Image (cartoon, rainbow, N blue to C red):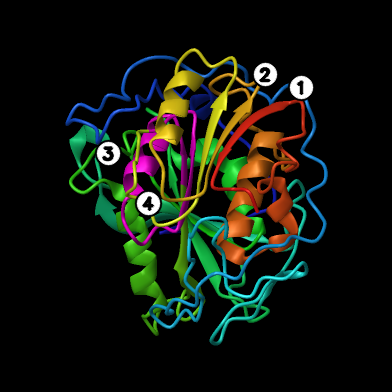
Amino acid sequence: MEFSARTGWSLTSMALTALLGAACGTGGAPSDTNGASGGGTATGGGAATGGSSSSGGAGNGSGGTASSGGSASGSGGAQSSGGAGTGGGSSGGTASGGAASGDCAAWATADPSEPGPFEVVTENDVGPLAGVGEDDQPTDFMVFRPAELGSDGQCHPIVTWGNGTGSTPDLYGTLLEHLASHGFIVIGSKSPNVAQGDPPPMVVGVEWLIEQNADAASPYFGHVDTANVGATGHSQGGLATSNAARDPLIKTMAPLCGSSGPGDNLSGPAFFFCGGADEIATCDNIHNAFASVSNQPAMFAKFVTADHANWITFGGSTPSPVEAAVTAWMRVHLMGDTALRPWFYGASCSLCTDTDWEIEQSMMDE
């Protein structure tokens, strides 16, 4: 296992030329050859053009309390309800952050457009072998996480990440480190085809972290909020995210520029993102996936000037508006950060009134 402390991010020229994934359709589970394969390379190497991060993220959220579902593997985290209009998240959320049950301390609210308070470490070559890597053989994972787990008594939610076709988690280092700086444990397979494998790797990574949380010899022991797990990924990784979210372990998802239609197989809210200028995974296809969900809160979010990749920050530590929105979504639904709830919920939500975005909501009135 390679272990390194990181305070910034740089990318090799090889990573910059990696394929960022091809169009992901709105059909069901992928075939063995994966409908998301083939296609375009990344266009644009900088942060998203146009628009600043959404304003109005702070403020008192009305957020209803999620159900008190049981904790798992000693995490002490409250299970997300995912019910209509609740927005999921830990139970008992207040404007100062989410309250947690059991032995886990509450999370204070934080600005998702700024780095969080945690120093981040990256672990390479960890976890089980899963999915399809080089030479069609299973491969292992990378983890981006706070350097000191449980430092203030919190249990850290899990975010499982899916890469675009031909790429690996380090290409998305700014976003994944940003999530980790906010307290999430982010696990991503090094497979360049994360929608493939039997089983595909995104849920396998979550199961491994749950096992680590119960292992007294593991640095994760007792520090993982195993009841609050999110999934997100780009392009083919968005398709893989939609498929992984059918597993009841996943309490919220945010597929980015790629998705299948999960239908009524989700256990919590969903954020479907597309770029208005994306010709690889078109917004029409992403909207079809959004429209397939009828039993959970769901948002269709189009960033008007974004294409398939120009919203990804390839250097530095400042997230793009899209990456900030993904961070806010995970904070609301996995940390109970109700101060950020108005970004997404209600007819006058912050993204709804930001002209850089075009938003459609389902079951998100409150």
**Which of the image's four quarters has the C terminus?**
bottom right
Q: Secondary structure at mark 3?
A: loop
Figure quadrant of residue 280: top left
Q: Which mark is residue 266?
A: 4
Question: Is residue 238 covered in magenta?
Answer: yes
Could you tell me if the residues under marks 4 and 1 are in contact, i.e. CB atoms within 8 Å? Answer: no
Q: Residue 308 in the image: x percent, y percent?
A: 53, 21
Q: Residue 40 in the image: x percent, y percent?
A: 43, 14
Q: Which mark is residue 50?
A: 1
Please report the residue visible at 44 percent of the width from the left and 79 percent of the height from the top. 71
Instruction: Answer with left or right where residue 164 lies relative to residue 300.
Output: left
Q: Amino acid at mark 3?
A: Gly
Q: Earlier in the sequence, mark 2 or mark 3?
A: 3
Q: Which mark is residue 76?
A: none
Could you tell me if the residues under marks 4 and 2 are in contact, i.e. CB atoms within 8 Å? Answer: no
Q: Residue 219 in the image: x percent, y percent?
A: 47, 75
Q: Secondary structure at mark 2?
A: loop
Gap in Å between the C-alphas at discs 4 and 2? 29 Å
**Residue 198 visible somewhere in the drawing:** yes
Q: Secondary structure at mark 1?
A: loop
Q: Which mark is residue 305?
A: 2
Q: Which residues are magenta?
A: 232-259
Q: Earlier in the sequence, mark 3 or mark 1?
A: 1
Pick the residue in front: 146 or 348: 348
Please report the residue visible at 49 percent of the width from the left and 72 percent of the height from the top. 225
